Image (spheres, rainbow, N blue to C red):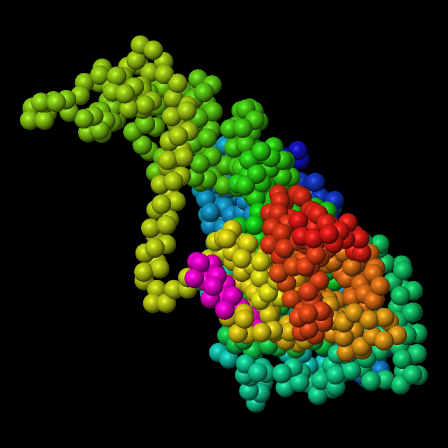
Amino acid sequence: MATKKIALAYCIDNLPVAESLYKALSQTSYSVSHYYCKKNADEATLAEQLRDFDGTILLLISDNFLRSEHCMNRALQLVQQKASNILPLVIDGRTKDEVSGEWVSTPTKFERIGDIIPYINYWQNKYLDLRSQKRKFEAENEADKREELNENLRVLRQVSSEASEFLRVLRNMRYYQFSDFIENHLRAFFEFVEDSAEWSAFKANVPNLSFQTDGAAELETEATTNVVEVPAEPESRDLPVVESIQEPEVAATPEEPVVPVEEPVEVVEHSHEPSETQEEWTGAELAENLEDLGVVIAEHAALANEEILLEIPPLEPEIEVSAELSIDEVVEPETAEVADTQTDTPLDAPDAQAHEEPATEAANAEEEEEEQNDDDDDDDEEEEQNDDYDDDEEEESNDKVSDLIREARGLVASGQVEAGINYMKQAIKMYPGSAELHYFYGLILAQNTRDLNGALEQLALATEIDPDHEAAFFLLGELAELQGDFNAARKHYERLIDINDEFTDVYYRLGTVLQANFPEEVEYAAKCFKKAAKRNPGNADAHYQYASILADVMGKTAKAEEWFLKTLDIQSKHPFANYDLALIYHTAGDAAKALEYYEAAILNNPELQTPENEIAFRGLGTPAEPVLEEVAEEIAEEVPAAPGESDAPEEPVALEELAGVAEELSVPALSPLLSIEHDTIEALKQNILRLEELLKAKAAQVEEAAVEEEPVVEEPIEMPPAKTALITGATSGIGLATARTFAQAGWRLILTGRREDRLEAVKEELIEAGVEVLGLVFDVRNYHSVAETIQNLPEEWHSIDLLINNAGKAKGLSEIQEGSLEHWEEMIDTNIKGLLYLTRCISPMMVAQHSGHIINIGSIAGKEPYPMGNVYCASKAAVDMLTRTMRLDLHKYNIRVSQIAPGHVEETEFALVRFDGDADRAKIYNDFQPLTSQDVANTIYYMATQPSHVNIQDVVIYGTQQASATVIDRSGRA
């Protein structure tokens, strides 16, 4: 470190530990200062005190610290901005027993998700409690207290939103438990500041150093005891050294938000310890839900615009919750009334605020005037605060959405998953324009059900409403990875980077996807890992992966060495970094270093201690005879006996013979035993691969053993073996021919039609041919039937790759003044509305999976009018225009949109339907050869099977004898 200054940063409740460290470090040449958070909210926060400090910060993380508003306010920015200078120490918290008055230790844990949840709950409960008080003040017209309360809310909201991310960053930093830190004369500290000389001097001057858990450190020298007094209160954060600190007289209880009221207001206390009546997810339970998804719930909750509890106090006992629970049964009566008035009002509508609380016009005017005054006052605040937080009006308009999400997640947390999901569905009906509702609904589905496509659809809606919803894009990326759609995962992560390239771990996730699935872009992956490491200096794997690419792909061994060493600085027991360094030094011919790092490698990962490695690395230095003999025996066992020698007495293999044996077995041999130096690096790399496979195999065995012990095991989600197409109007004509064509190519088919008997016959025909088929009976003109059927698709049919909007018809052939209204409505409802209904139900799925293809069956009638074709031509012209506009809307989601506009086509019921079953009038193809339905089906298949970067947007197809809608050679069939 550049300066020899130390800041002890801590919560005042942890004074004894800070004092003991102060006394110990005062025996060094370092200048030690105290920085601590206080109970008085008017004082500068801990982060503000340390803003200009340029030395080493020993950050004492305790349960008290994590529950202190003064410590946690802007703590995330502190650890992000000063990460290289901060050394976190995890110490026990302290609370006073209310009965005995004695101090009691409280363990501080944040290594697992289950450890983090209580802290998130604690801060979000405090935020929600204070917000409830704000509503009470407003109801009592206490406008004079609003400004101060709003500021307190702002602070609590920030702490609540950043708590989980702060703990996540801490977990990725190099931190020490207090007991480990004080070992061996604070060696960890001196290693951190890279000051070995000071450490040696400290050990010499203070040979006997011990710490008491309940008081100051005991420092004993051979000559005399040096006791340093510590100040009671540092007057300024710039003081280099302080002298004495008094024990705080008040109990170290979690801070309550400052409430600007004269009379005391009753606040419900939320203990961080789970009560008997509360059900809280354990770390194991949560991990079980999230392990397959790779979803970190705390991260998503913290990054949302509204902070939602992860563990909710149970509902009132008198309310019975069932799977059919309605919102009206849970929310307060006045809330239910408000909800009714907002059913069709988007959350962000200009007049949404007006529906929240019943008020007179005069009251509204007064409130608007007060809010305007508040806004004028806020103009004087710092610019960044205006960027970080919504104004009061928007916050109030989101209150009910936040409450609804809280209730739903409370149901899920208590084990009532179905009730929570139903609750979310009703909430979305009330507030369809809320991105947060869609996001958290998707999160609940992803964590608690197998309905990943449903989750993807909700997340896609969230990003539709809020195109900059960071958490939604990150979760979309994770789910895409889970489903094996790495193109989609990549695009989601890249979109998130466009929005916020400081988002935690987005570069790391993108780098992982690129490295594993886009080998041609490995240098791009390297850049991502490098950026990930710089944004999160505690991410050991980001450092390691970058180093690996530097060494194995880019050939930059010097740079790779530097990054492998950085990896070990973060994770000293990394399973492979030591071995990679051993390979680098082996290549460079540095035998001593190669052996040093090899021995460190096998200490951390015994699987690396193989005969090949023993020969390679120990052979670079002085051979160890016992090791050579052991290796010789292992190699001898692998050498097949010569013919006729199977019964010969065994003789030990001489060490001199190892060279030939090693060469035959492709085993790196010992240099001293060979006349010619063999290159061992390639073999060692192969050995690493083999060892990694071995580790994976062992992990799989452990997993299998765990599965066998479980009484009930859910099958992993199986991806469909082939692509899936949904074809409407599949019981005849073009639809039937298309179904048969795609069936022959092995596609899975969802076929729809109105006539159940025909649909069943087609389904049986294709199933007998070995095709997976799902038949859906509905009329495309009935939106409710369409939506309900699609919504209730079996889970294995949720991923739809291709939608063919084929259902359509022509009815009648008459001049406009004589047209049948019934015919008009039937054509408009089928050709336009039916296409829209299916597209509206299927396209969100495609957006969510970031892939798909929609092919609309149009007509030449949509491009060229003909006499008496009026409404039919208009309906197909609508299909033509819809195709173009759909393409503009969906191209950014990697969805292709196409149209095929055929001329006359036989082998269909087109003419028969147009003339209401009159077979004689329907004989319009006798004097020329039109297209067949198979011709059109073949073209559709061609359009659908082009490479993913090719979008055939429009195809016009005629029979040879037809030149336009009205120009036809009727000289006879060719």
Position of residue 793 relative to residue 245, above or below, is: below
The quarter of the displayed image where residue 852 is located: bottom right
Classify residue 968 as left or right of residue 100: right
At a point 36% along the width and 13% down the height, the residue shown is 677
The quarter of the displayed image where residue 651 is located: top left
Classify residue 366 as left or right of residue 951: right
Q: Which residue is outermost to the front?
A: 971
Classify residue 30 as left or right of residue 812: left
Please state the horizontal and vertical placement of residue 643, each as a whole percent of the image.
Answer: 12, 22
Please state the horizontal and vertical placement of residue 71, each as a whole percent of the image.
Answer: 66, 58
Please state the horizontal and vertical placement of residue 107, each as a whole percent of the image.
Answer: 50, 61
At a point 92% along the width and 83% down the height, the residue shown is 361
- Given residues 22 and 260, the one toward you in this image is 260
Looking at the rendering, the stretch of residues picked out in magenta corresponds to 761-777
Query: Any magenta on residue 773?
Result: yes
Query: Any magenta on residue 670?
Result: no
- Given residues 403 and 766, the one toward you in this image is 766
